[in-house]
Amino acid sequence: MSSSIIEVENLTKRFGTFKAVDSISLEVKQGEIFGFLGANGAGKTTAMKMLSGLLSPTSGKAVVAGFDVFKQQNQIKKSIGYMSQRFSLYDDLTIKENIRFYGGIYGLKRKQWKEKGEALVRRLGLDEVEGKLLKDLPLGWKQKLAFSIAILHDPKIVFLDEPTGGVDPITRRQFWEMIYEAAHDGITVFVTTHYMDEAEYCDRISMMVDGRVEAYDTPEGLKKKYGVKTMNEVFIKVARP
Ligand SMILES: Nc1ncnc2c1ncn2[C@@H]1O[C@H](COP(=O)(O)OP(=O)(O)OP(=O)(O)O)[C@@H](O)[C@H]1O
C-alpha cells in the first residue's frame, strides 16, 4: 500500500464569521489522481490554496509532501506544481519565454530548463510555434502547455484547479492522457473539476458541500453507495440532497 502524501484533519478556514472550509479531513496517497469536487462556492479553491501553501488556515492540521501547512508554506511551494484557470501563463510572452520564466521561478538551472523545455516542446509538437506569443495559441494548447510547465520541476504533487474549463471534449481527453502520464511517473494529481466524466477518471473523489466534505470514496464506491450509475447522479444526490 502506498504512503500518504497529503493528510488533512479538521482543516478550517474562516473569512470573518463565515466558514469557507469547515473542518475537512482527507488523505491522498502518493501517485494517486484525487478528484476534489463540489458545487460553485463549496470551498474547493480555498482548501486547495491552503494545501498549496498560498493561504494560511484558521485551524486544524494538514501535512503536504511532509510539510506543515501552518509553518512550512515555503517548503510546500517548492514541492508542488500549481495550475489554475486564473493563474496561468503570460499571454504576451512566447512559449519559449514562458518556459524560461517559470523554469526560473521553480528554481531550475539554465541547463535544466533548456533541456526540459526542449523535451516538452517536442512532446507537445510545438516546435513550429515555440516563438509565437501565447495569446496566438488555441486555449486547449495553452492548457496543455500550462500543465507541462506546472510539472517542469518534477514536483511531488500537482494541484489543478479546473484545468480544462472551456475546452472541447477531445482536448479534455488529451489533457487527461497527460494527467495519467504524470501519475504514472509518480506525481500525485489533486484536481478540481465541474465535469463529471472527468470525475470518473479519478482514483478517488471527495465532494464538498458548503465547506464540508460530504462524500469521499472511489467513483465505483460512490456510485454503489448512492445506488446510481454515473458520477453525475452521485453529484446531484450529494450536492442537492
Ligand atoms: N478572501 C475571501 N474573503 C471572503 N470570502 C471568501 C474569500 N475567498 C472565498 N470566499 C468565499 O468562500 C466561499 C468558497 O469559495 P471558493 O472559491 O473556495 O469556492 P469553490 O468551491 O472553489 O468555488 P468555484 O467552483 O466557484 O471556484 C465562497 O462563498 C466565497 O465567496
Image (cartoon, rainbow, N blue to C red):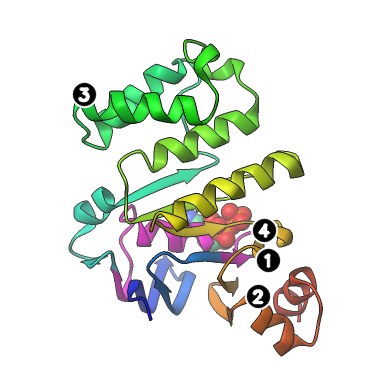
Residue at coordinates 53% horizontally, 30% vertically from top-left?
Answer: 124
Q: Earlier in the sequence, mark 3 or mark 4?
A: 3
Picture layout, residue 85 above or below residue 61 = above
Amino acid beneath label 4: Glu
Q: CA distance from mark 4 to mark 2?
A: 11 Å
Q: Which residue is mark 2?
A: 219
Along the viewing direction, whichever of 15 and 125 lies nearer the viewer: 125
Residue denoted by label 4: 198
Tell whether position 58 is magenta.
Answer: yes
174 drawn magenta = no
Mark 3, ligand 1, within 8 Å: the answer is no
Q: Residues within 10 Å of mark 3 (few under 14, many from 20)?
A: few
Sooner in the amino-acid sequence: mark 4 or mark 2: 4
Badge 1: few (under 14), some or many (20 or more) residues near its Cα, within 10 Å? some
Q: Which residue is mark 1?
A: 200
Residue type at mark 3: give it: Arg
Q: Residue at x 30, y 56 (%)?
A: 53
Q: Secondary structure at mark 3?
A: helix
Local crowd at mark 2 within 10 Å, few (<14), some, or many (≥20)? many
Ligand 1 within 8 A of label 1's CB?
no
* Magenta residues (range): 36-63
Tag 4 secondary structure: helix
Residue identifier under label 3? 110
Q: Earlier in the sequence, mark 3 or mark 2?
A: 3
On screen, residue 129 versus residue 9, left or right, reads: right
